[in-house]
Image (cartoon, grey):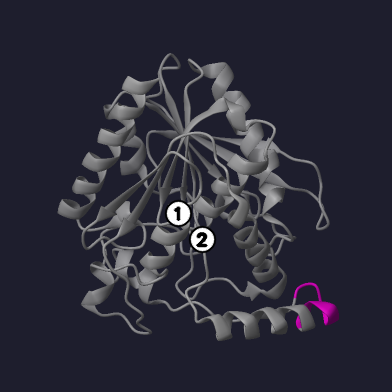
């Protein structure tokens, strides 16, 4: 089921990996013009691109819009694959670079990379490591996953468990590691206003693989030496809350990550970082209640206009 209207998708064939055939999917707005600046959006974990209003807002503000469903996510998930699995976040560099080159050929060459949550972590490491990062003129991070939302002791214990479990089985996992509260807070069948495919973004999440946790930890550690050269906008909520069952708190807090981690680590990603706090925003800031997300759009486009005037 593909709920999106006014968007087209293109399958990107990638090099086979340790599970066999691999694809990614490039989603494009049908209102792209090809002669203006472009945005490439990367989704989060247990996620895929369904935020049509995000693309529409960029189009209305004179940007072409593209999004990637990364390998083993959403439209790109193949029957033989373990959902959302990777050994190293650098695996995603292949499809990001192919998408960027395609957009660069189809546009005026001004590309902004945008990432939400785990997509923000992937994008940040891409901007430190990839040979194609020179094609990106700016980076927008929407509640980026820059650290685990756990105490230092718990992070260490999870790391030890992951080291042990992956010795016995590459695909050792934890079921039900994610609370359904966040999905309930955004889906229209529960307490939210958005529609999306539960096969690609299930209520209980997908299994969390220990090997994936090690890949995330490695990506986090790399950020200690981050030196992103382009301007970076780090967007975050004004507050976090830890809840196991849905409550109204979920509508006005980041219930997935700790915003203090985002601010502390995000500020050190490069020499041209701007922090944008969005009062009472949800984890995916642009899925927040309308008045809140409109404030977020206003702040983001104000930053983009500054970027434009300084270029």
Query: Which stretch is magenta?
Result: 165-171
| The image quarter in which residue 174 lies | bottom right
Density class for disc 1 (Cα within 10 Å; few <14, some 14-19, many ≥20) is: many
Query: Is 41 situated above or below 181?
Result: above
Viewer-proximal residue, 76 or 54?
A: 54
Give the quadrant of residue 240.
Answer: bottom left
Q: Residue at x 19, y 47 (%)?
A: 295
- Going 65% across and 50% down the picture, which residue do you hit? 71
* Contact between labelled residues 2 and 1, with CB atoms less than 8 Å apart: yes
Would residue 145 be counted in the magenta stretch?
no
Q: Position of residue 212 (x, y in %)?
A: 67, 67
Q: Secondary structure at mark 1?
A: helix
- Residue 181 pos. (x, y %): 36, 76
Residue 179 shows up from this direction: yes
- The residue wearing badge 1 is 266
Q: Secondary structure at mark 2?
A: loop
Viewed as shown, does residue 184 lie left or right of 24? left
Residue 254: percent from the left, percent from the top?
A: 33, 67
Residue 303 in the figure: left or right of residue 35: left
Lateral position of residue 235 relative to residue 248, left or right: right
Q: Residues within 10 Å of mark 2 (few under 14, many from 20)?
A: many
What residue is pinned by disc 2?
A: 146
């Amino acid at each position: 089921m593909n709920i999106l209207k006014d968007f087209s998708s293109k399958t990107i064939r990638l090099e086979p990996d340790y599970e066999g055939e691999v694809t990614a999917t490039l989603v494009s707005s049908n209102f792209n013009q090809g002669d203006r600046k472009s945005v490439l959006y990367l989704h989060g974990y247990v996620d895929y691109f369904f935020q049509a209003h995000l693309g529409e807002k960029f189009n209305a503000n004179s940007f072409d819009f593209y999004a990637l469903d990364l390998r083993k996510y959403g439209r790109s998930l193949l029957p033989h694959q373990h959902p959302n699995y990777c050994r190293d976040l650098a695996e995603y560099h292949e499809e990001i670079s192919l998408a960027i080159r395609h957009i660069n050929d189809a546009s005026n060459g001004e590309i902004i990379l945008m990432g939400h949550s785990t997509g923000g972590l992937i994008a940040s490491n891409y901007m430190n490591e990839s040979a194609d990062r020179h094609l990106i003129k700016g980076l927008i991070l929407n509640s980026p996953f820059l650290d685990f939302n756990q105490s230092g002791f718990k992070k260490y214990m999870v790391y030890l468990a992951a080291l042990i479990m992956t010795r016995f089985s590459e695909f050792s996992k934890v079921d039900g590691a994610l609370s359904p509260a966040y999905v309930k807070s955004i889906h229209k069948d529960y307490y939210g206003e958005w529609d999306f495919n539960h096969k690609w973004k299930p209520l209980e999440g997908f299994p969390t693989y220990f090997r994936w946790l090690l890949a995330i930890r490695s990506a986090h550690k790399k950020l200690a030496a981050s030196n992103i050269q382009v301007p970076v906008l780090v967007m975050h909520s004004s507050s976090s809350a830890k809840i196991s069952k849905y409550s109204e708190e979920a509508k006005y807090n980041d219930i997935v990550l700790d915003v203090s981690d985002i601010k502390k680590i995000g500020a050190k990603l490069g020499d041209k970082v701007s922090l944008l706090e969005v009062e009472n925003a949800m984890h995916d800031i642009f899925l927040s209640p309308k008045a809140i997300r409109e404030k977020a759009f206003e702040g983001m486009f104000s930053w983009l206009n500054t970027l434009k005037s300084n270029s």
